[in-house]
Image (tube, grey):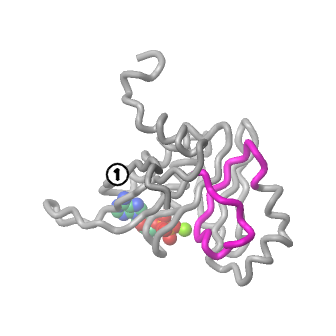
Amino acid sequence: MNQLQRTVTRYLDDEAAMVAFGRALGAHLRGGATVFLEGNLGVGKTTFCRGVLRAFGHRGAVKSPTYTLVEPYDIDSGTVYHFDLYRLGDPEELEFMGVRDYFAPGQVCLVEWPARGRGVLPSPDLIVSVSVQVDPVKFVSGRSVAVIAQTQRGEKILQLLERPVTELPGM
Ligand code: ADP
Ligand code: MG
């Protein structure tokens, strides 16, 4: 692991906060990015992806594409691909799907259970790592979300995500 990887960490105490954070990240993915989502079953990865898709104007439901492995969402500037590789038997299946075409430059790809596709998937720009975290004061279980840059592109996206609201144009 590179010690200099930029990381943005948030504690998010409910589903709405998770969607809002996904949306905030999604707003900076327009030029294309590959995002891996890590964390246990039921931790909130798909919820986060719903937020990202909201940033691209998708208002409908977002379900984990467990059986089809990938769900494409048409957006004005192209397509966002949402993968869930939980049920992937062999990474070779991804080769048969022509997975490299999905990860073309400029595309947005969100991948749940990326470890299942190890060796075939390209490396990500960002890793989103989600875990359950109990709020010690309110004693409710929210989520800790860490977004870790893996490439220069990922660094740039996190820089934009961290930028204070007062620096945004029009403020
Ligand atoms: P995954 O895709 O990781 O299997 P889901 O996105 O389907 O998980 O979410 C599972 C559950 O976690 C949902 O019921 C959702 O409401 C809940 N959840 C998501 N984010 C949070 C959060 N920040 N705090 C509490 N519950 C959350
Ligand atoms: Mg899921």
> The magenta stretch spans which residues?
103-125
Residue at 48%, 18% in the rendered image: 169
Label 1 sits on what residue type?
Answer: Arg
- Residue 154, quarter of the rendered image: top right
The residue lying toward the viewer, choosing from 28 and 121, is 121
The residue lying toward the viewer, choosing from 141 and 16, is 141
152 to 115, vertically: above or below: above
The residue lying toward the viewer, choosing from 9 and 84, is 9
From the viewer's perspective, tell me whether residue 141 is left or right of residue 63.
left
Residue 138 at what x, y percent from top left? 16, 60
- Residue 100, quarter of the rendered image: bottom right
Q: In which quarter of the image is the C terminus?
A: top left
Residue 37 visible at all: yes
Residue at 34%, 51% in the rendered image: 10
Residue 124 at what x, y percent from top left? 62, 56
Residue at 67%, 54% in the rendered image: 109
> Residue pushed farthest left?
137
Name the secondary structure under disc 1. strand
104 to 142, vertically: above or below: above
**Badge 1 local density, few (<14 within 10 Å), some, or many (20+)?**
some
From the viewer's perspective, tell me whether residue 129 is left or right of residue 139.
right
- Residue 164, quarter of the rendered image: top left
From the viewer's perspective, tell me whether residue 113 is left or right of residue 24.
right
Residue 59 visible at all: no
Residue of label 1: 10
Q: Is mark 1 within 8 Å of ligand 1?
A: no
In what quadrant does ligand 1 lie? Answer: bottom left
